[in-house]
Image: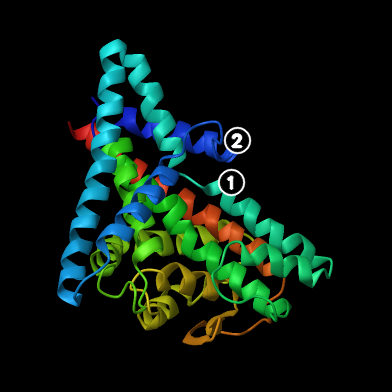
Amino acid sequence: MTLPPLSPELLALVLAALVLDLWLGDPRWLPHPVVGMGRLIGALEARLNRGRPQARRAKGVVLTLVVVGLAWTLATLAIGLAGVVSPWLALVVEGLLLWTCLACRGLVQAARAVATPLARGDLPQARRAVSAIVGRDTRELDEAGVSRACVESVAENTVDGITAPLFWALLGGAPLALAYKAANTLDSMVGHRNDRYREFGWASARFDDLVNLLPARLTALAMWCLAAVVPGLRRRGALTATCRQAPAHPSPNAGWPEAMVANLLGVELGGVNRYGDQISDRARLGTPIETLKARHIDAAIRCLYAGTAGVLTLLASIILVLEAVR
């Protein structure tokens, strides 16, 4: 049995998993659940994504329910079976599963792999590095374009890879955190607005929007709150500007951390992106007080840490208050 939701014991286990992620990064020696999710989604998509639009949408709903439900069920079974052997083994299994849900160290390393060559003027290497974390065409990006792509990725993935898994983990342990990762993986694979996935991926995209609704806004608020103690961030007016600008983003959630990071850094995010032959012109977020450069990637990483610490502090405070009144 998993630990009770919103309990000090679960908070301690989640913190331990976060420390492991910050210290060691992705546990590559473990079979990664997200890899298994991706293979399952790919196999099911190949079989189900056919027929008329209404049939595709219905089968997409089934896909979402099956993958998310299976992730939750398998995690619950793994922890339960370990608990039959020993309560301590159940804790170890749940802790390891929680570890696989977090990507703080990996995201920071990927961002620094862009910032380091960019700072020394190696634009080709910086373009190659940023192409690993964004889907847009990076071959002709200048320093500002590479910096923008990386900062946007750091801002959005602070939610997807860190704060949202932490949020759902504290509400329901590893099973709920893995269910969230399943929803996120579904959206990244089939939640696209093109001819192939518009109907089939509709349910996956909408479900991902739902599960990120609160974490995205909490993360933006946490970044703003902790910006008061983080050097180099422009906190004044950032909250008001973010509330005004975020709804203009195509995603109902990604705009919140992106707009907050843009306003805290005093830069402009959004604009024209190229995806092969397609051009996407996204809403501008922030105010271009400064021209985007490599150093803004490091500032975005500081926002990542601030958002993570702020969300954890808020949730930990709620847990401790609930424990005090029990």
Q: Amino acid at mark 2?
A: Leu
Q: Quadrant of the N terminus?
A: top left
Question: Which of 51/130 is in front?
Answer: 51
Determine whether, in the image, residue 274 is placed left or right of residue 72. right
Can see residue 3?
no
| Mark 1 closeness class: few <14, some 14–19, many ≥20 residues within 10 Å | some
Q: Position of residue 193 (x, y in %)?
A: 35, 77
Whether 279 is drawn above or below 130: the answer is: below
Look at mark 1 in the image and give the residue it sits on: 105
Residue at position x 41%, y 73% from top? 255
Q: Which mark is residue 194?
A: none
Q: Position of residue 158 (x, y in %)?
A: 48, 57
Q: Are marks 1 and 2 in contact (CB under 8 Å)?
A: yes
Q: Quadrant of residue 321?
A: top left
Identify the secondary structure beneath mark 2: helix
* Visual colour scheme: rainbow
Residue at position x 27%, y 20% from top? 81
Q: Position of residue 73 (x, y in %)?
A: 23, 37
Determine whether, in the image, residue 91 is placed left or right of residue 55. right
Can see residue 277?
yes
Dot placed on the residue nearer the N-terminal end, 1 or 2: 2
| Mark 2 closeness class: few <14, some 14–19, many ≥20 residues within 10 Å | few
Identify the secondary structure beneath mark 1: helix
Residue at position x 30%, y 61% from top? 208
Residue at position x 55%, y 31% from top? 29
Question: Which of 319/274 is in front?
Answer: 274
Q: Position of residue 91 (x, y in %)?
A: 36, 22
Q: Quadrant of the C terminus?
A: top left
Determine whether, in the image, residue 228 is placed left or right of residue 138. left
Look at mark 2 in the image and give the residue it sits on: 24
Q: Amino acid at mark 1?
A: Arg
